[in-house]
Image (cartoon, helix red, strand yellow):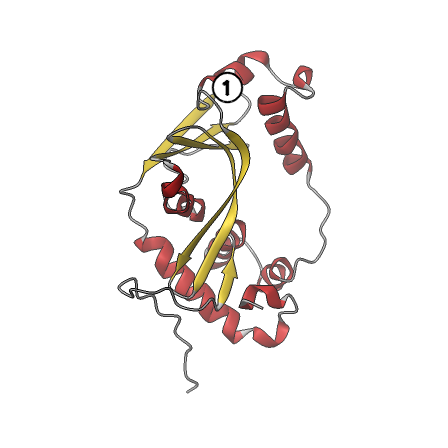
Amino acid sequence: MTDVYICPFNNKHDTLASITYNLYPTLLNLFDMYQKGYLERQDLINRINRVPMPQTEAQARGSSFEEAVIKGVNEEAFDPDILDKVRALLPRPMMKTQVYCEHQLDNVLLYGYVDVIGKTLAVDIKTTSSYQEGRFAHSHQNFYLPALRSKGIRTLRYVITDFKDVYQENYDQTIDFSVQEIQIKLFCNFLEEHRAEITDTKIFGK
């Protein structure tokens, strides 16, 4: 029986540990899909290695929608009522868009970008073909909350549209990360088990 590598988290350290893993929310959310059987192992390895993949129509539409909401680009391609509903949920004033976030969890650095921040509210815009309430409760993007605490952000709001209606989910600094932390440990184990197949060494803090 082979030993299983454990990626422990110890948040009681007075000083930060050295970085062993650089992870971003999209990759961790893909690992969640892999765990649930929606993604093949090789597809996950390819995403870890940043193998170029063609953009899907849904991804292109989502990016275009964000541009329309925030910058007013190509607005005519979308329902004006949906645009208005989404904009009504953005922070006022908008202080900055595409804000870099990072948060260290023991030896793991989590990093990414949130769409827009205000004085106390951060917003990430999501598009989907189907929405279920509470969909982002265990999203790894929720780590943007501790990452943005020093900027005065108290709430992270997901603004979601299926292009028929608009929904929102709000999370604050009291959020429980226990589910995400367990999944990060399991992903670190996966990385170690498949280290020989991983060519993008940035993920190992290099």
Relative to residue 151, is residue 198 drawn left or right?
right
Q: Nearer the viewer, residue 1 or 143?
A: 143
Q: Position of residue 115 (x, y in %)?
A: 53, 34
Vertical comparison of 8 with 175: above or below:
below
Vertical comparison of 152 with 47: above or below:
above
- Say which residue appears at 40% left-offset and 70% top-offset: 7
Q: Position of residue 22 (x, y in %)?
A: 52, 61
Residue that carries the numbered disc 1 in the rendered image = 87
Quarter of the image containing the C terminus?
bottom right
Quarter of the image containing the N terminus?
bottom left
Relative to residue 34, is residue 132 drawn left or right?
left
Q: Nearer the viewer, residue 38 or 113?
A: 113
Q: Position of residue 69 (x, y in %)?
A: 58, 22
Q: Is residue 112 visible?
A: yes
Q: Residues within 10 Å of mark 1 (few under 14, many from 20)?
A: some
For residue 195, which quarter of the picture? bottom right
Q: Nearer the viewer, residue 184 or 128?
A: 184
For residue 49, which quarter of the picture? bottom right
Looking at the picture, which amino acid does disc 1 mark? Arg
Q: Is residue 128 visible?
A: no
Vertical comparison of 182 with 175: above or below:
below
Relative to residue 127, is residue 108 drawn left or right?
left
Q: Position of residue 197 (x, y in %)?
A: 63, 72
**Label 1 secondary element:** helix
Relative to residue 161, is residue 145 drawn left or right?
left
Number of marks drawn: 1
